[in-house]
Amino acid sequence: MPKPGPREVEHEITVSAPATAVYRLIAEVENWPRIFPPTIHVDHVEKGDRTERIRIWATANGEAKNWTSRRTLDPEELRIGFRQEVSAPPVAEMGGTWVIEPVSDTVSRIRLLHDYRAVDDDPAGLAWIDEAVDRNSRSELAALKENVERAVASEELTFSFEDTVQIAGSAKDVYDFVNDAHLWAERLPHVASVRLDEDTPGLQTLEMDTRAKDGSTHTTKSYRVTFPHRKIAYKQVTLPALMTLHTGYWTFAENDAGVAASSQHTVTINTENITRVLGADATVADAREYVQAALSTNSRATLGHARDYAEARA
C-alpha cells in the first residue's frame, strides 16, 4: 500500500515529429478525443491568451469521470501547466506540466509531470490514483506518439464529415429523441438492442448492437456527454474493423424554420484491415468511402426518425 501524502511522478516518450507540432497538438484541446484514448470530450469554460479553464470528460480505470482544470500556455518554452480546479474523488488535488523538448529538427521528447493527493490522504485512494495516472499517462503518450507521427506521415487516414436535416419542430424534442437512446431498439430499424447507463447526469455509457446492410450485426460501445438541448458529444471505444478512431457529436440549432439537426463524425481508417474487409485491391480511398457511407446511412436514418418524432409533437 502506498504511503499517504502528495505524490510526484514523471512519464516520457520520444516522437518523430518537430517539437512545435507536438506542442500545438497538445495545446489545442478540441483534438484531445482524437489523440488521447481516455478523453471523451473537452470544452472551454474560459479562454485567454495564455490561461484557460477547460472541462474534461475522460475514463480512468474503466470509469468515466469529469473535472475542471486551469491551464497555463507557454509556446516559447513549449510548456503547458495544468491544475485540476474541481477534482473527482478519490482525487483531492492534481496538477502537472507538459514539457516538450527538441531533440533535433524532426524528433522531440515529451515529458508529462504529475503531482497529486488523495481525499483524506487515504492509502487505498492513492493506490487507485497511482494506477490511473500510470495507465493513462502511458496510454496518452503512446497515442500521442502514434497520432503525431501519423499526422506528419499522412493526412488521408483521418477525416471528418457531417450530415444535417432541417426539422419543423423544437430542438428539445429532437434532442430528446437522440438522448433517449435506450428506446432506439424500438424506434430505429438498424438498432437490434441497446444498453444505456447514466450513473452521473449528463455522462452516458451506450452499448449497441447495430444491423448492417447484409443482415449481420456488430456491437459498439460509446461514452456520451450531453448538453441539453443543444449538443451530445461522443467517443466510440469499441470499434468496427475499419476504424481506429471514431468521435463525433450531434448538434441541435434552432432557426426560423425549426431546428437544424446535425451528426458530425471524425474517423481514422485502420489500414491493417482494409484488405480483409474490402478485398485485395481495396485502397484507403475505398475504405474512406465505405466507412462514410455506413456512418452517414445510420446517422441520416436516426435524424429522419427524430424529424418524424419532433414534427408529430410540434
Image (tube, helix red, strand yellow):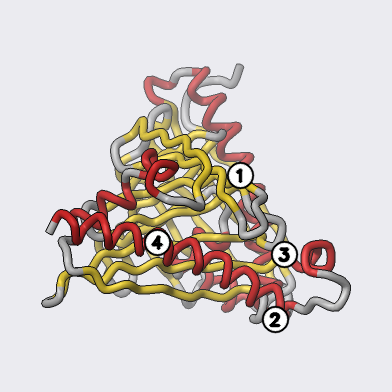
Any part of residue 11 in sight: no
Q: Earlier in the sequence, mark 1 or mark 4?
A: 1
Label 1 sits on residue: 219
Whether residues under marks 3 and 2 lie with C-beta atoms below 8 angstroms apart, the answer is no
Residue 236 vs residue 294, the one in the foreground: 294
**Residue 34 sits in quarter:** bottom right
Q: Callout 2: few (<14), some (14-19), or many (20+) C-alpha neighbours within 10 Å?
A: few
Q: Secondary structure at mark 4?
A: strand
Q: Secondary structure at mark 1?
A: strand
Residue depicted at x 77% and y 79% = 283
Residue depicted at x 60% and y 60% = 245
Label 2 sits on residue: 285
Q: Quadrant of the C terminus?
A: bottom left
Q: CA distance from mark 2 to mark 1?
A: 25 Å
Q: Give the vertical position of 229 relative to 182 (above or below).
A: below
**Residue 141 sits in quarter:** bottom right
Drawn side of residue 115 relative to residue 255, left or right: right
Residue depicted at x 15% and y 54% = 313
Label 3 sits on residue: 270
Residue 62 vs residue 56, the one in the foreground: 62
**Residue 288 in the image, given as x and y percentages of width and height:** 65, 75
Q: Amino acid at mark 4?
A: Tyr
Drawn side of residue 251 relative to residue 106, left or right: left
Drawn side of residue 148 relative to residue 126, left or right: right
